[in-house]
Amino acid sequence: MVEIGGGLRAYRANGVEVLDPYDPDELCPGWSGKVLAPWPNRLRDGRYTFGGRSWQVAVTEPDRHTAIHGLVGWVPWRPVARTADSVTLECLIAAQEGYPWPVLLRTQWSVGADGLRARHEATNVGAEPCPFGLGAHPYLRLGVTAVDELTLQVPARSHLLVDGRLLPIGAAKVAGGELDYNQPRRIGGAVLNTAFGEVTGEPVVVSAETSCGRRSARVWADGAFRWWQVFTSDTLPGDRFRRALAVEPMTCPPDAFRSGRDVVTLEPGQTWTGTWGITPGD
């Protein structure tokens, strides 16, 4: 776990790096392992409407003029509980310009026989309702296998169509198309930065044949997460280019604060919960 961003720096099972790690003194690359809240993915121009009013948050992805991945990816989280197999981190989204609602976040990271598990809570500690969404950003590597060698299965019926800013302009069914991963398919040279919707509730499965045999990981999520973002890390620099596959559970799609799609409205005092995890296999 890491203090800044409240997320994962590494996860190893049976001596194999399931996730693509980074060094303790290294700046987190490509949002690796971070918690994304109170919205995941991109928000067009940083503008949205809620409660009959318009709001503007900082544009944090200047090249695309979007606000990306929420407000807590680069702020400290603090440990509030520990056990032999878990740690719980906490972060307050302070009321601020563009998002004037205080929300207390808490994530319990735990490991066990079934793999890695993340349980997220968000409590509206303010006096007014607020919009909320959450995602996570793990990069799967499965040892030393490159993205092109991975086999991917995404149980979903649709995907979003996006413009040059990676913002949604429509949706399409995946059946029979180049983005149909309902049956396992090798990624090869495919370039993915894709939001999959109408998920079936089954896990995303990533696997590879290596010199040490077959390796796999199942990324699962409960019903709070209605979307999967899959990213082949084509924009990461240096040796991280197409080295790992981001499989991101999200409660809502890109630009959800503008569309309203699957956005949670947290009432004062209300707590939302969601759980996802990674189960490594052979």
Image (cartoon, helix red, strand yellow):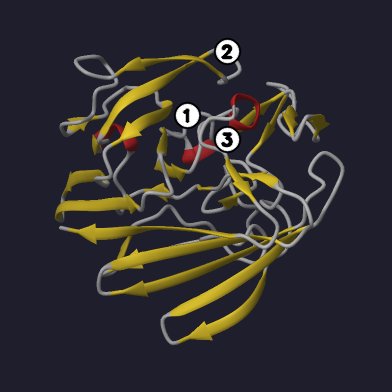
Q: Residue at x 68, y 21 (%)?
A: 64
Mark 3: amino acid: Asn
Rendered view: 252 above or below 108:
above
- Secondary structure under tag 1 reads loop
Image quadrant assignment for residue 19: bottom left
Q: Residue at x 15, y 56 (%)?
A: 212
Q: Which residue is mark 2?
A: 164
Separation of marks 2 and 3 at Cα, in angstroms:
15 Å
Does the rendering let one see residue 1?
A: no
CB under 8 Å between discs 2 and 3:
no
- Secondary structure under tag 2 reads loop
CB under 8 Å between discs 1 and 3:
no
Give whichever of discs 2 and 1 has the lower sequence position: 2
Total numbered badges shown on the rendered structure = 3
Q: Which residue is mark 1?
A: 234
Mark 2: amino acid: Gly
Quadrant the N terminus occupies: bottom right
- Secondary structure under tag 3 reads loop
Separation of marks 2 and 1 at Cα, in angstroms:
15 Å
Q: Residue at x 74, y 23 (%)?
A: 45
Front one among 63 and 144: 63
Separation of marks 1 and 3 at Cα, in angstroms:
16 Å
Front one among 116 and 93: 93
Q: Which residue is mark 3?
A: 41
CB under 8 Å between discs 2 and 1:
no
Place of residue 227 in the rendered image (x, y in percent of width and height, measured from the top left) = 41, 37
